[in-house]
Image (tube, helix red, strand yellow):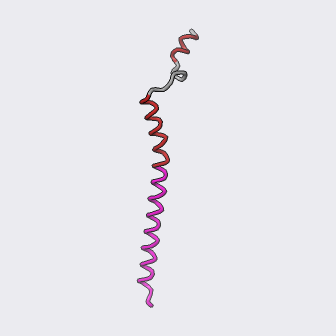
Amino acid sequence: MASMEQSGSTMGEEPTWAELLVSFLLIGAIPVVVGGAVILSLVGLTLWTRAMLRRRKRGSPA
């Protein structure tokens, strides 16, 4: 019985090229998604603050 359980386990076998490729793509996608979200939020905040400053300068009677 013990030998059947060991042969059914796939943890000891080497992964195939497809499994390696999928795992590398998933691992690589995480920093890309997180970094992209951070960059987009920084750009959005920068544009928003610039727009707010422009409105204040226009609205102030100088």
Identify the residue at horizontal 52%, vertical 14% (top origin): 7
Quadrant assignment for the C terminus = bottom left
Q: Position of residue 16 (x, y in %)?
A: 45, 26
5, 30: nearer the viewer: 30
- Residue 48 to residue 5: above or below: below
- Name the residue nearer the viewer: 37 or 28: 28
Relative image position of residue 42 (x, y in whole percent): 48, 62
Residue 45 is a magenta residue: yes
18 relative position to 5: left or right: left
> Which quadrant of the rendered structure holds the N terminus?
top right
Check the image and report above or below for 24 versus 36: above
Q: Quadrant of residue 36?
A: bottom left
- The mark total stands at 0
Asked where in the image residue 5 lies, by quadrant, the reply is top right
In the depicted structure, whether residue 1 falls above or below residue 13:
above
Residue farthest toward the bottom in the current orientation of the protein: 62
39 over 23 or under it: above or below: below
Residue 8 locus on image (x, y percent): 51, 16
Residue 10 coordinates in the image, percent (x, y): 51, 21
Residue for point 44% across, 82% down: 57
* Majority SS type along the magenta span: helix
Q: Which residues are magenta?
A: 33-62
In percent of the image, x 50 and y 24: which residue is there?
A: 14
Whether residue 54 appears in magenta in the rendering, the answer is: yes
